[in-house]
Structures are given as structure tokens and as C-alpha cells.
Amino acid sequence: MDSFPLTIRPGVAAVVFNAENEILLHLRKVGGGWAPPSGSMEPGETVAQALSRELLEETGLEVRIGRLVAVYSDPAFQIVHYPDGRRVHFVTTLFRCRVKRGTMKGSEEGTEWGWFPSERLPSNLLPYARVWLADALTDSPRPLVK
């Protein structure tokens, strides 16, 4: 039996593009694979405020928030198991974003940070990152809630 109850949190995430149309990813400590930056909303924030705050904290970048990609809640890949035993089911709102200004710094949430062309993404993407990126990189109609 797990020592912590499963909790649920609203999350935000971004597929961030730079001027060269490369995508920002980080090698996550939790999970050990590459993924777009993401985080939790705080009480009193809008989704846009939470996304802007998380990106500034994690990357040092200010972004222009673009289109909504989708809202993800599938427990198959939206439950995160933390090393301390916590389990969090995230309901994540994903957006496409573009760098407005700032200098990329990266945070301790990732062991590495990098910009990748969409046709040469790392092979060790986390399962949710595969879904998020596939959806963000297509322009075909799809459900907004997954």
C-alpha cells in the first residue's frame, strides 16, 4: 500500500518554440526522460498566469502563449509517482508558446535542458511527453480533452 493518498492537481504545460523553431525540453529528475516544461497552478492564478510563472521560474523565459493544444487527464500517463511516495494525478492544460524574451537558464527540475528540432526529438521522451508533442505538432482537428 502506498504511504500517501492519490491527490489531484491542476497543471499547466508548454511546448515552447524559439526563433529557430526548435522545441525546449528538459531531462526530468522525476521520470528520467525528456519532456516539455510543466508545473502546478497555485491558488488564485489563472491558467495563463500559472503558465507564465512556471515558465519564468523554470526557464528564465517570457513567452507569448499561443493556441491551446488540449487538456489531459488520462490516468495512464497523468499520474506522477514522486520518490518520496507522493502520487499526484495532474489535469494538465497544454499550450503552444513562443519565446518573447529572456535568457534560458533552466531549473533543478531538469538534469539537462535543450532545444530540439521537431524532426530530431530525443528517443527517451516520457510517455506523456510523446502524446503532448504529437498533439502540439499537428494541425489536424482532434479532441481538445484527452
Image (tube, grey):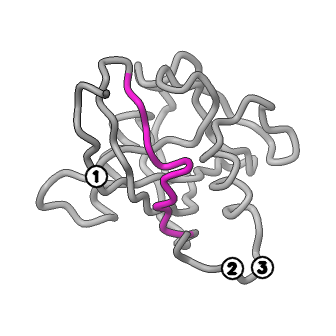
Magenta residues span 70-82
**Residue 73 located within the stretch drawn in magenta:** yes
Nearer-the-camera pick, 34 or 120: 34
Q: Quadrant of residue 70?
A: bottom right
Q: Image check: 10 left or right of 128?
A: left
Q: Position of residue 118 (x, y in %)?
A: 80, 48
Q: Tell me which label, 1 or 2, sits earlier in the chain.
A: 1
Element carrying mark 3: loop
Distance from the alpha carbon under mark 1 to that under mark 2: 24 Å
- Residue neighbourhood size for the residue with mark 1, other residues' Cα within 10 Å, grouped as few (<14), some (14–19), many (≥20): some
Q: Which dot, 3 or 1, sits closer to the camera?
A: 1
Q: Tell me which label, 3 or 1, sits earlier in the chain.
A: 1
Which numbered dot is residue 140?
3
Disc 2 target residue: 142
Residues tagged 3 and 2 counted as in contact (Cβ below 8 A): yes
Tell me the residue at 13%/56% (across/down): 43
Distance from the alpha carbon under mark 3 to that under mark 2: 6 Å
